[in-house]
Image (tube, rainbow, N blue to C red):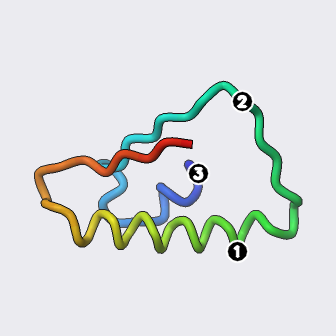
Amino acid sequence: MRGAISRIRDYLRIRLHASNDAAAVIGRVVEPLALAVAELLDNAARYSQPSTSVEVRI
């Protein structure tokens, strides 16, 4: 998630709230998943009010 957040222009507006539960992803899936999540975060930041933060809960 942090890798995806760092890829977007408005990364400072993203607020990540993660639970203590562990999650794992197979190595070959990491890069495509990060790109997909970055696209979603970019859309969320782009189409929300500029003065608001984008809340992400995982």
Q: Is residue 18 left or right of residue 13?
A: right
Say which of marks 1 and 2 sits in front: 2
User: Callout 1: few (<14), some (14-19), or many (20+) C-alpha neighbours within 10 Å?
Assistant: few
Q: Return the disc, 2 or 3, that comes first in the chain's sequence.
A: 3
Q: CA distance from mark 3 to mark 1?
A: 12 Å
Percent across and percent down for residue 50 are 14, 59
**What amino acid type should be assigned to the residue bearing mark 2?**
Asp
> Which residue bears the numbered disc 1?
32
**What amino acid type should be assigned to the residue bearing mark 1?**
Pro
Q: Which mark is residue 1?
A: 3
> Which residue bears the numbered disc 2?
21
User: Callout 3: few (<14), some (14-19), or many (20+) C-alpha neighbours within 10 Å?
Assistant: some
Say which of marks 2 and 3 sits in front: 2
Query: Which quadrant does the C terminus fall into?
Result: top right
Give the SS element for disc 2: loop
Give the SS element for disc 3: loop
Percent across and percent down for residue 29 are 80, 68
Q: Which residue is drawn at the image coordinates 86% and 69% (left, top)?
A: 28
Q: CA distance from mark 1 to mark 2?
A: 22 Å
Q: CA distance from mark 2 to mark 3?
A: 14 Å
Q: Which residue is drawn at the image coordinates 72% and 30% (left, top)?
A: 21
Q: Which residue is drawn at the image coordinates 55% and 60% (left, top)?
A: 4
Q: Which residue is drawn at the image coordinates 36% and 45% (left, top)?
A: 55
User: Does residue 13 sit above or below 40 in this rendering?
Assistant: above
